[in-house]
Amino acid sequence: MSAPAAPSTPPAPAPAPAAPPVETMTVKVNGKTVQVPKTMPDWQGKPAPTTMLQAARIAGVDIPHYCYHDKLPVAGNCRMCLVEFGTPMIGPDRKPVLNEDGTPKIARSVLPYEPGTARGAIACATPISPGMEIYADSKATQQMRESVLESLLINHPLDCTICDQAGECKLQEYSVQHGKAGSQFVEAKVHKPKAVDLGPRIVLDDERCILCTRCIRFTRDIAGDDALGIVNRGSYNTIGAFEPGRFDNNYTLNTVDLCPVGALTSKDFRFKMRVWFLKETKSLCTSCGTGCNITIGSREGVIHRYEPRDNDAVNGPWMCDSGRLNYRWIGRADRLKEVLRTSSGGPRERITWNAALETAADILRRAPQGGVAFVVSARQTNEELFLLKKLATHTGALTDSVPREGDPDRLLVSADRNPNSNGVRLTGMAFTEFGFNLLKIADGIALGRIRTLVVFGEDLTREGLGPELLAKLDALIVSDILPNATTAAATLLLPGAAHAEKRGTFVNVKGRLQRFQKAVEPPGDARPESEFLQELVQAVTGEEPARSIEGLFNRMAAGVPAFAGVEWARIGDAGVTVQL
Amino acid sequence: MSTKVVDRAPLTFYERTYLPAILGGLKVTAKHFADTVFKGKAVTMQYPEERWVVPEGYRGAPYLVKDQDGATKCVSCQLCEFVCPPKAIRITPPGSEGRPADRANAEKMPREFEINMLRCIFCGMCQEVCPEEAIFLQKDYSITGENRESMIFNKEKLLSLGGTHAGIQKWKHKLEEARAQESFPVETP
Ligand code: SF4
Ligand code: SF4
Ligand code: SF4
Ligand code: SF4
Ligand code: FES
């Protein structure tokens, strides 16, 4: 199996050569004539005959569906997308039969043995033909939907009050939109296993499953781990894992998003918060250089979950489990919340931001050229790096960053575990190879040439710059989010904000410039770095701060060649590709 | 929506002297005065020693109820928290580590459930929306406390004040149905 969701090649920034004319076909959806392409990309992006469901979408009509998913092979098993349709009549002479007014006569689809009854076709798997008419809201179509829903609900437990899916459940939504309230089924419901431990991150409720097989297709065709299947027969059909409890690849939680009902739910999110309370914020995953687009679900300053957000240029609709679950540190109780200063020999004291920035500006203004060094983190935003670069240039400082490597996988996870390595390179804070200058910086400190070290978001004691070496410095200005040995040694500690607490941009491994928004407030005195860095830059160089992140970004775009011509507003939710 | 503007009739000179309103009010007072003094029909009560009989269907303070087996009926669906107009309700869901429900099969119940009685307007929306018949407006109308904290009733207090409500016990019946099923033995709690 190939990996269809692997990020497609980003479009070149230069105007693409004129695309070959698309062959189109005319169809009617609910009486509205539309031109649709003859072929459209299938789940792997290969051209395939356009289906009725796709044609209806182009006409702005959403046909309800469960088993169909843009990025999964078509299964056609749920029948939710049944629609009545008609095709132009062909006479015995193989010519179209015309109405009196000259328009082609349409033959409605009917049952061959019962011509009075409409016959539906599944819109997700039926290709369109020229002149076809799709009746997505005719009486017959509505009846088909009602019957399908009634049959799906025959054995459904209606657990909505305790079901984590409630509020974003397609069974609830379609039942309200297309179903009828009653059921003709009077027998006892079939009961199936509940709260089954499918894998380390997934719980399965077999009673709620509507057997759409989305989960099976995902794990087989996308994740490449053929772990799930259907066992037992008829109304006893149940989803099962090949080895019980061992549905454990790094993409299992995508099946929770895919499952249209509450059959597959996340153990991490289980019973944590009802989804209608969650505020949704467009953000990015920071766990590796791929930069998967995510939606942060938070309520009253607490982050409850990450979910992937569609972006075909980066992650498609998926994300890995390790990235998705990597959010709890943001709410950790030991977050750095206070601005602290250690006066020579004295104890650490809590000071105001103004005092801290004055102290820092004073140190940087007095430092001789080359007497300062900067170690920045590739987890920082472009804006922050741009501001740090200004300070570094002003002080003639050596700069570097810290690499973070891991094993890549075939779908999304990148070997580079920093979200913004390319931002560090493009802003000029480090070379292609990170860690190149660290030795020189260590030497400089040992020789007493470098007397001030500015560290953002990295623990240098793990990179060979031990506490004894750091103790040689006159000033160690550190900004971080969580405590570590370097923050413990800092003479000036500036608490920073996690990405979910600020706005900014990253450049992923493929050169996609993407922006993220703020979901929650930083704790205590912690502030977004770009805010206090602007004030620091003003204090050191006299440059007026920009009033907003938009202004700051646009200023950076003018100063960094790779970002030339890009504006904050133009990045949009899907990002833009920049030249690396 | 179409609206109809109704002209306000101009006041007569007599009405503008306020006399009719004042006399009308005095008439009511005089009637009650006469009733009390001459007919012995008191319309006031010696509250709080004397209390009125709360009529059926009165909407007093909302409390949580237990079922006939003594189990917490609330499953922490948070619909009441969502619907409550003055945001008087605050529920802490159990999360994956929380204690499962008192009853087999119901899977969840709130870890904490608080109603701020200073905020509650006794509107009854929570009772109306509750799919589990777990919260009811009862007859308490006079709730006092010495500080704001004591006016926030927690789950324990709400349950002890609420008493028992004998309902249909759907979770119990689902479980019985599952146990009775022959051909597809499922593991039941
Ligand atoms: S799957 Fe949907 S309809 Fe079924 S119990 Fe859950 S929320 Fe309700
Ligand atoms: S568990 Fe969900 S995704 Fe899988 S077949 Fe059942 S309903 Fe479909
Ligand atoms: S009675 Fe009304 S105000 Fe009081 S808790 Fe219920 S919904 Fe809220
Ligand atoms: S009282 Fe009722 S509505 Fe409120 S959370 Fe409990 S079950 Fe839901
Ligand atoms: S979407 Fe399931 S059959 Fe078409």
Image (tube, helix red, strand yellow):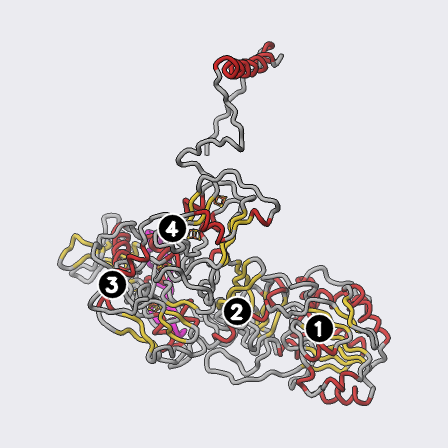
Residue closest to the eye, A477 or A405 = A477
- Mark 1 or mark 2: which comes first in sequence? 2
Q: Which residue is mark 1?
A: A479
Same chain check for tags 4 and 2 = no
Q: Residue at x 44, y 69 (%)?
A: A267
Give the left or right position of residue B65, taking residue A230 as reference.
Answer: right
- Mark 1 or mark 3: which comes first in sequence? 3
Q: Which residue is mark 4?
A: B131
What whole-number distance in Å separates the C-alpha atoms at marks 1 and 3? 59 Å
Callout 4 secondary element: loop
Callout 2 secondary element: strand
Q: In the image, which residues are magenta? A: A23-49
Crowd class of label 3 (few under 14; some 14 to 19; many from 20; radius 10 Å): some
On what subunit does the disc labeled 3 rest? Answer: A
Residue closest to the eye, A420 or B158 = B158
Quadrant hosting ligand 2: bottom left
Q: Is there CB contact under 8 Å for labels 4 and 3?
A: no
Ligand 2 within 8 A of label 3's CB?
A: no
